[in-house]
Image: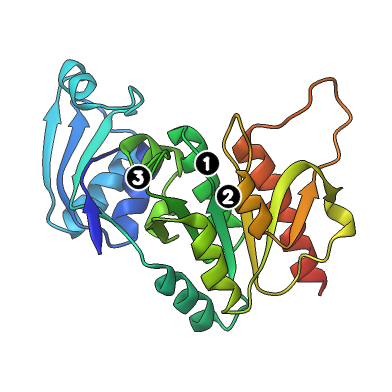
Amino acid sequence: MRYEEFTIEGRNAVLEAFRSGKTIDRLFVLDGCQDGPVKTILREAKKQNTLVQFVNKERLDHMSETGKHQGVVAYAAAYSYAEVSDILDAARAKGEAPFIFLLDEIEDPHNLGAIIRTANLAGAHGVIIPKRRAAGLTAVVVRTSAGALNYTPVAKVTNLANTIEDLKKEGLWFVCADMGGQTMYDLNLTGPIGLVIGNEGQGVSRLVREKCDMIASIPMKGDIDSLNASVAAGVLAYEIVRQRLKG
């Protein structure tokens, strides 16, 4: 395992970190803040014997990397990157066909966090990101994922195209999002599948797109020509969910 350390900010993100069993070294709470959600967090902290400090807003603002701490900041032991094999093992443990998100150079941490959240809610077994030219597991990603990062493994790989080739040997098919593709409703998205989402500006790179078995387009009726990467991921993910439930 490889580790990156950072703070966890925001009430939901901190609470889910506690509930998932993650080791929280210290918890900082805005002095005088005793509403329901904060009391719940403090109860979880007491269960784990976490050191709690009540501090003023100026100190919390200084500690915050996102600027949206909601009165709570936690220092966690570290989130770890999984291996691709861990994601496949998670699918086997559930007796399900693998469903994996592969993100091709997603650079905006807000998009990455939102996609991890969607992956968790859609029942995906994990997310794969490249080492270069992509956002990693930062504090912004943790907060935006709303706790999903505690449950959905994220693997970091050197070469996404090679990883797709390796996963094809495990029986997976791959679909990528691209405006020039076939309408998603006309594609068979059941079975072991990898959903490939491209960069916010350039989309899926040529090398990665060529490795995909299907190219899916999302029907759009508006006046602009593209969706935000995390929104596109959600739309396609839930078409996969729909087909898996129907099948």
Find residue 86 and report its horizontal and vertical position in percent: 40, 72
Find residue 58 and report its horizontal and vertical position in percent: 18, 15
Q: Are marks 2 and 3 in contact (CB under 8 Å)?
A: no
Q: What is the secondary structure assignment of the residue under circle 1?
A: helix
Q: Do the residues labelled 3 and 1 touch (CB within 8 Å)?
A: no
Q: Do the residues labelled 2 and 1 touch (CB within 8 Å)?
A: yes
Lower position in the chain sequence, tag 3 or tag 1 = 1
Q: Is 132 placed left or right of 74 in the picture? A: right
Residue bearing the label numbered 3:
137
Q: What residue type is labelled 2?
A: Thr
Find residue 56 and report its horizontal and vertical position in percent: 16, 20
Q: What residue type is labelled 3?
A: Leu
Q: What residue type is labelled 1?
A: Ala
Q: In this view, does 47 lie above or below 55?
A: below
Q: Please give the label number shown on residue 114.
A: 1
Q: Please give the label number shown on residue 118.
A: 2
- How far apart marks 2 and 3 lie (CA) works out to 16 Å
